[in-house]
Image (spheres, coloured by chain):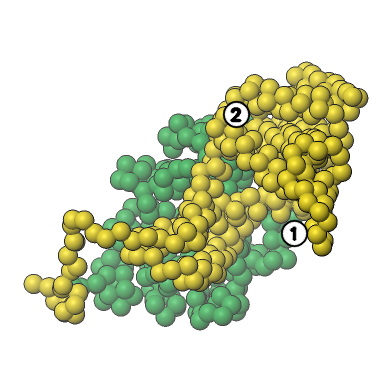
Amino acid sequence: MTMPLFDVSNASFCYPGFPDSLIDVSLSIERGTRTALLGANGSGKSTLLFLLNGLYFARQGSVSFNGTKLTETALDTNAFGTEFRKSVGFLFQNSDAQLFCPTVFDELCFGPLQMGMPKPEIRRRAEDTLKLLRLEAFRERSPQALSTGQKKTVALASLLTAAPSVLLMDEPTAGLDPRSQALLLDLLDALNESGTTLVTATHDLHLLPEIADRAVVLGEDHRVAFDGPVDDVLANEDLLLKTNLMFRRG
Amino acid sequence: MNRLAIPDWMRQQAEFEAGPSHRVRTAPGVRFARKALSSFSDLIAEMVTQKDSAMRPGYLQALDPRVKTVVLLSLVVAMTLVHSWGSLLLGYTACLALAAVSHLPAKRLLKVWLVVPLFTLVFMLPATLNVVTDGDPLVVLWRSAPLGFLPENLYVTFQGVEIAGKMMLRTAACVSLALLLAYTTRTDRLFRGLRALFVPSLFVTVLIVMDRYLAVIAKVAEEIHMAKLSRSIRSRGLRAEHEWVAAGIGSLFRRTQSLGHQVYLAMLSRGFTGEALVIDDLHTKPADYGFMAVAALIAASLVLLK
């Protein structure tokens, strides 16, 4: 039996001074799969992504990557920390938080530079990614001066230059116009076909079959309410109503 | 049919009263508070402008940031050492020439060049009087028989005006040099320039994060101000406005704390380890050596010119 890429075991988490955000969550994510984290606002989807990216650490239980538990000590270890950051890209829900370089081009170079990649290779990757995501016109623009959708695209592009084997994405389609959404979906398909593991937090049921094969539904009680194929989730109206992913008027 | 029963008062929308209305006078203090808050949006625009001008082609923009930082800061030191009118005018003229060949936005620079000297002059006004700087009378302001603690004569002296004038010119030149550095150097390269001056990495990292947080705070402050304006019907007086400003500052820090933390997490997530790295390799070119030579010549002339 092969080791799962991510193994979340009975993980609980709460922000200081706040009620629990995640309670007793267990799941595993295999390499090359497409997983959606579904749930209403405040159910803990984003928090789970932060745990998977080793930015927060479980108060109880554990989160492992490739068999190594994600702890501050493990990530401070140069070899594992660098390898983990190289392998796992995280698209934040708030692009304003993610973009901090003076230009779009610098933004695309930031990750690979930190990872010690050779500069000619970084430039080549940045140029390719600008072209791929149709961002050439914004090359020298300040990311802060872009629209919400453009910022989101630049944020994604800044992850792609490091060629991560895992992409954690928090509401990646939010704020994108239909054409940009289509481009993103095509891109995610191509990445997944080449072996990239995709984990997407969303409450957009409309796009769910396009971005995932498996869905992990978090209930408003911050526990896993369902874990199974996307089609089963979409067919389970009671589950969707109970977890506030769908409503009936009146 | 609408299934949600809304209260009656919600059905009675306020009518828009067109036509001449009485004029509401806003207290000067309130206007000042509003002006101060609205200047946050100017700050955001200025931050973007500063970044744009640093990327515009120009003489100073093309120089190695390490050379530029060292040279311009050395010129600031040289300017503080000079005393003659000739040196001060030469230094100031050099700043103007550098701004011109670097294609800096004249409007913004003019604002600074006009405001800073005037501000300095106001501070230096007491130094022009004979009670502070003794000397030959230029304008007599007061002449009387001895009366208590008041001086017998109060006048503006030639020597006092000279000191104030030189101070004003020196300040203008030093501020101009600092502006030239800030407006022609992208922040990431400016930080590398500081590293070249052996500023510790930890200190530079704090500056990098502060630079990013400043933009975040300014943006949130602008949003709070806009939200307030959109819901303001009439002025509530200076005291209420002061209370609102205090509450706004508290709210601003609560909101930015979370966003600021996310910025830090995003940097960590992308492998940031505390060192400012940029894609461009920094090479010292012949133009940089030329700039150093000319700057050294100017600095020597400034100090030696009597």
Name above or below for residue B294 compared with residue A60.
above
**Colour of the chain lettered A:** green
Circle 2 is placed at which residue position?
B104
Judged from the image, the secondary structure of the residue bearing numbered disc 1 is: loop
Label 2 environment density (alpha carbons within 10 Å; few <14, some 14–19, many ≥20)? many
The answer to whether one can see residue B205 in this image is: yes
- Which residue does the image show at 51% across and 68% down from the upper left? B242
On the rendered structure, is B143 left or right of A49? right
> How far across and down, in percent of the image, does residue B132 sit?
83, 48
On the rendered structure, is A138 left or right of A105? left
Label 1 environment density (alpha carbons within 10 Å; few <14, some 14–19, many ≥20)? few
Q: CA distance from mark 2 to mark 1?
A: 46 Å
Judged from the image, the secondary structure of the residue bearing numbered disc 2 is: loop
Q: Nearer the viewer, residue A81 or A17?
A: A17
Instruction: Indicate the quadrant where residue B170 lies.
Output: top right
**Colour of the chain lettered B:** yellow
Name the amino acid type tagged 1: Thr
> How far across and down, in percent of the image, does residue B106 sit?
57, 29
Name the amino acid type tagged 2: Leu
Circle 1 is placed at which residue position?
A77
- Which residue does the image show at 65% across and 32% down from the upper left? B184
Q: Chain of mark 2?
A: B
Q: Quadrant of the N terminus of chain B?
A: bottom left
